[in-house]
Every structure is written in structure tokens, then in C-alpha cells.
Amino acid sequence: MNAEQNKALSETKLQIPILALGGDIYPAFGGDAPSNFALDPTQGLAENVKGVIIPLSGHYIAEEQPDVVVKLLRSSS
């Protein structure tokens, strides 16, 4: 694939379902800062985006809250 092909493909949003996860603990921002930093940029790339903030989780969501992530993945399919 070359740059010209990439440019053409980037003009169409993804149609597949996207699950954008965010944590609610960000030490860099002083602790609890519920936000989903993955959601906004992903909505610019895809049509079908669902954003979820995972409680008691920071940067490593799948490692910090594996049961929650598995439950979300199973319910999304």
C-alpha cells in the first residue's frame, strides 16, 4: 500500500463497531479525572463508536479491570 492509497482510504470513515475505553484515574491530572481520551479522536475515524469510562482504572485498562473489559467485549459482539 502506498501513500496515495492510504489517503484515499482515509477519506471514508470505518463502518465497523468500535469500542473506545477510557479510565477514570489519571495521576498526571491530580487523580480522578473521568474522561475518555480515546473517544473523540475515534469518532472522527468511524461511524459506529461506543465510548465507555471504566471505573477504578487508569492507563492500563485491560490489566487493571480485566473482568469489566471481558464483559464489555462479550456484550459488544
Image (cartoon, grey):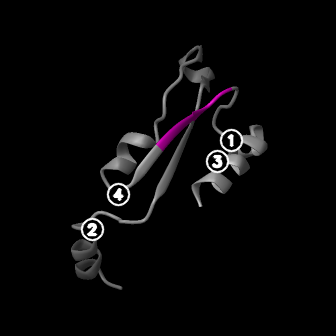
Amino acid type of the residue tagged 2 in the rendering: Ser
Amino acid type of the residue tagged 1 in the rendering: Tyr
Q: Which residue is mark 3?
A: 72
Rounded to the nearest whole Å, what is the CA distance between mark 3 and mark 2? 28 Å
Marked residue nearer the N-terminal end (4 or 2): 2
Asked whether disc 3 touches disc 2, contact meaning CB atoms under 8 Å apart, the reply is no
Rounded to the nearest whole Å, what is the CA distance between mark 1 and mark 4? 23 Å
Q: Which residue is mark 4?
A: 46
Amino acid type of the residue tagged 3 in the rendering: Leu
Q: Label 3's element?
A: helix
Q: Which residue is mark 1?
A: 60
Q: Which mark is residue 10?
A: 2
Q: Label 1's element?
A: loop
User: Does the stretch in magenta take in 59?
Assistant: no
**Would you say the magenta stretch is mainly helix, strand or loop?**
strand
Marked residue nearer the N-terminal end (1 or 4): 4
Marked residue nearer the N-terminal end (3 or 1): 1
- Which residue shows up at 58% across the image and 55% down it? 76
Rounded to the nearest whole Å, what is the CA distance between mark 4 and mark 2? 10 Å
Q: Nearer the viewer, mark 3 or mark 1?
A: 3
Q: Position of residue 44 (x, y in %)?
A: 30, 51
Marked residue nearer the N-terminal end (3 or 4): 4
Q: Nearer the viewer, mark 3 or mark 2?
A: 3
Q: Position of residue 40 (x, y in %)?
A: 36, 41
Q: Nearer the viewer, mark 1 or mark 4?
A: 4
